[in-house]
Image (cartoon, helix red, strand yellow):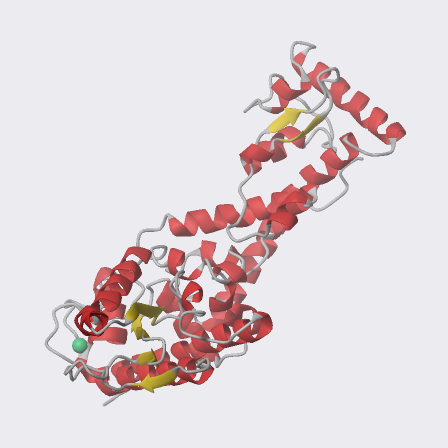
């Protein structure tokens, strides 16, 4: 169990080299956070493995596997060796669990590091706790699961049957995600796209134009060279929009507000409405009306989708919108506003004895999906199940990202 393995410093060097190479391939700006690179693709990161952190996790998991080996002979030898190490280093004053939670060694030790003698350092490095699992055996130490972080959206069965190394790797990944989230500018939109794998699958598959990929990663981290960002980096003196009189050119303004991109913004909306409406399969006695007025309401407003059942006097009014996902609260506000938008027409129908349901589908201009979109699928008679639904959601994100990239390109390069 002697350590003839890699030196941690060598691994850190390799990590730095990989990071620098990926940054250079994509020409990502220096300001793009390292945490994005090490967050899993399913959560919106680039999915790189951090060799140094993985190695620490692997060493700790292996040590605990030996201490808790199903082979009683191995378990006995490992636990005896652990007690000997602890006794030597604490001069028999501490139990293994107390020693392993020390921040510093009590004595200067020149022992060669082994799996077992490194447990304390590796535990400390990963910021986790251990626990004694058998009351009558102080050396029966294992992971304290309460102290481990788990990435969101993991199915229950995966959590229950995970190995020690898997749990530690999840913990490492979640710590990168948390650090990214804590970043004021770069982390504020994570909540919008990290909850749905399909909003991030393009990061894993790479089935998207490389320029769109780069745009989307930088857009989600708010590092695209808008006038706002350039001013922050002191590369320009004014935040004024380069295409309209707006005082602050932010990514939200370019992708959703600037008059210069009006036609392309409308086109993006139309493309998304078309994709969704093609997936609507009206049930018997229901008719689908796209971009038409609500009948018998004398209103000339045109919701994106109206589903009508004159026989049963039922109606569904739905609006589809693509807003800038500044944060999840913003997406909530937009959804609420869109649901209330056609309340007047809905009330007129209700007065005529109709049962009316108003709803909205809200997407982000950087490919996010509002968490309440999918629960609306049955109401909108979107006949999508399992694989078909996944493909549909992935395609929606891809279409939105490609359209938004066109809007960005038109804003920055158009002369
Ligand atoms: Zn503008």
Left or right for 363, reference 118? left
The tally of labels here is 0
- Residue 12, given in percent of the width and then of the height, sits at 58, 50
- Residue 201, given in percent of the width and then of the height, sits at 53, 69
Q: Residue at x 37, y 84 (%)?
A: 288
Is 308 in front, or is 227? Answer: 308
- Residue 263, given in percent of the width and then of the height, sits at 24, 87
Q: In the picture, which quadrant includes the C terminus?
A: bottom left
Location of residue 330 by image quarter = bottom left
Examine the rendered structure and indicate whether residue 134 appears above or below residue 251.
above
Name the quadrant where ligand 1 sits. Answer: bottom left
Q: Residue at x 22, y 66 (%)?
A: 340
Left or right for 200, reference 75? left
Examine the rendered structure and indicate whether residue 223 appears above or below residue 66.
below
Examine the rendered structure and indicate whether residue 91 appears above or below residue 113.
above
Is 225 in front, or is 382? Answer: 382
Location of residue 366 by image quarter = bottom left
Q: Is residue 110 visible?
A: yes
Left or right for 141, reference 45? right
């Amino acid at each position: 169990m002697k350590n003839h393995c890699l030196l941690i410093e060598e691994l850190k060097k390799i990590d730095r080299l990989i990071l620098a190479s990926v940054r250079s391939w994509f020409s990502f700006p220096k300001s793009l956070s390292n945490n994005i690179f090490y967050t899993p693709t399913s959560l919106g990161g680039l999915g790189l493995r951090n060799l140094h952190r993985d190695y620490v996790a692997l060493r700790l998991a292996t040590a605990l596997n030996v201490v808790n080996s199903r082979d009683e002979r191995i378990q006995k030898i490992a636990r005896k060796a652990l007690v000997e190490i602890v006794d030597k280093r604490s001069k028999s004053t501490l139990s293994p669990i107390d020693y392993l939670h020390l921040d510093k060694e009590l004595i200067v030790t020149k022992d060669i590091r082994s799996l077992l003698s490194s447990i304390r350092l590796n535990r400390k490095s990963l910021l986790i706790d251990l626990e004694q699992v058998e009351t009558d055996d102080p050396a029966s130490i294992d992971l304290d699961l309460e102290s481990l972080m788990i990435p969101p959206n993991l199915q229950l069965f995966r959590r229950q049957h995970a190995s020690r190394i898997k749990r530690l790797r999840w913990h490492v990944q979640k710590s990168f995600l948390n650090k990214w989230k804590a970043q004021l500018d770069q982390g504020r939109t994570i909540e919008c796209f990290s909850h749905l794998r399909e909003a991030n699958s393009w990061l894993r598959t790479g089935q998207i134009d490389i320029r769109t990929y780069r745009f989307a990663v930088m857009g989600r981290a708010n590092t695209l060279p808008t006038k706002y960002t350039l001013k922050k980096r002191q590369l320009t003196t004014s935040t004024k929009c380069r295409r309209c009189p707006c005082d602050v050119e932010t990514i939200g303004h370019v992708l959703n507000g600037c008059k210069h991109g009006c036609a392309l913004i409308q086109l993006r909306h139309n493309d998304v409405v078309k994709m969704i409406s093609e997936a609507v399969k009206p049930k018997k006695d229901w008719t689908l009306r796209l971009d038409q007025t609500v009948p018998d309401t004398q209103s000339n407003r045109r919701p994106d989708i109206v589903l009508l059942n004159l026989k049963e006097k039922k109606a569904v009014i739905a609006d589809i919108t693509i807003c800038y996902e500044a944060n999840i609260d913003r997406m909530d506000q937009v959804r609420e506003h869109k649901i209330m938008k056609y309340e007047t027409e809905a009330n007129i129908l209700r007065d005529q004895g109709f049962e009316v349901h108003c709803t909205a589908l809200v997407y982000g201009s950087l490919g996010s999906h509002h968490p309440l979109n999918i629960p609306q699928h049955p109401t909108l008679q979107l006949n999508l199940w399992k694989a078909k639904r996944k493909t549909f959601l992935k395609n929606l994100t891809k279409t939105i990202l490609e359209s938004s990239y066109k809007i960005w390109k038109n804003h920055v390069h158009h002369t």
